Amino acid sequence: DAGVTQSPTHLIKTRGQQVTLRCSPISGHKSVSWYQQVLGQGPQFIFQYYEKEERGRGNFPDRFSARQFPNYSSELNVNALLLGDSALYLCASSLLRDYNEQFFGPGTRLTVL
Amino acid sequence: AQSVTQLDSQVPVFEEAPVELRCNYSSSVSVYLFWYVQYPNQGLQLLLKYLSGSTLVKGINGFEAEFNKSQTSFHLRKPSVHISDTAEYFCAVSGYNQAGTALIFGKGTTLSVSS
């Protein structure tokens, strides 16, 4: 079975631009979570979606938004990019909302210049 | 609020030596505990998890961890490491909180195995 997939692998943007990152969960998984990992730090929770509804949100500004589609894939959008948004963005999927064994994708490396 | 503290940012060790990576957590609710490994330029791979039951948890690649509720610790151990174990290791806690069932990660421990 395919694991969690993310696209693109790498992305370079300039300050003020907008970016969309994509994630496809493991087949059958209905929950998708997004994490930001700044270099040298542990991942930080951004969003969790379950059955297409937002179930949790971390301490991130409103420039960050996400959605989940009927096929359970998900997009993370970041507007008005700042230099500090440069990070590895990780997507994780899990089977159920409350059983939190999460399976991570390889991530999208975003560089903001 | 939940939090995770990984007590060592870097752990250098020689091949075939034992290793322990330390993790303390704080939580006001029941928790699930996890250890993940991250190899360079890759995502996170689950090593092992504690959900309930036996406090000694065995994972992949010969790793094990012990849940100690009284000391709020979940230390990761391996009796004999290999060069290939060189990676970043993250302890994480999950439980019901305002952010749903998010994973809260520590800052990571870099394990460097040399010959």
Image (spheres, coloured by chain):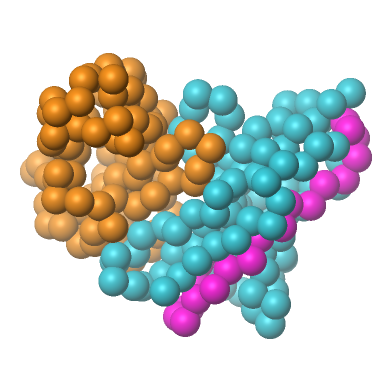
Quarter placement of the N terminus of chain A: top left
Q: On the rendered structure, is B55 left or right of A87?
A: right
Q: Residue at x 89, y 33 (%)?
A: B14
Q: Give the residue at x 77% y 42%.
A: B11
| Residue nearer the viewer, B39 or A26 | B39
Q: Give coordinates of residue A39: x percent, y percent.
A: 48, 34
The range drawn in magenta is B14-33
Residues B64 and A57: in front is A57
Lateral position of residue B109 relative to residue B33, left or right: right
Question: Total label count?
Answer: 0
Query: Which residue is pictured at 35% across the width and 45% down the height?
Result: A35
How far across and how far down the image is residue A16, in percent? 14, 28
Residue B19 in the figure: left or right of residue B109: right
Compared with residue A76, is residue B21 higher up or lower down, i.e. above or below? below
Residue drawn at (60%, 61%) of the image? B5
Reply above or below: A65 against A12: below
The percent coordinates of residue B96 (x first, y second) are: 36, 73
Q: Which chain is orange?
A: A
Residue A108, above or below A27: above
User: Is residue A2 among what the camera can see?
Assistant: no
The answer to whether residue A112 shows anywhere in this view is yes
Task: Indicate whether residue A28 is drawn in magenta.
Answer: no
From the rendered image, report the letter of the chain displayed in cyan: B
- In the rendered image, the residue lying farthest to the left is A70
Q: Quadrant of the C terminus of chain A?
A: top left
Picture quadrant where residue B82 is located: top right
Give the quadrant of residue A98: bottom left
Q: Quadrant of residue A87?
A: top left
Where is residue A97 shown, x and y percent of the image? 29, 61
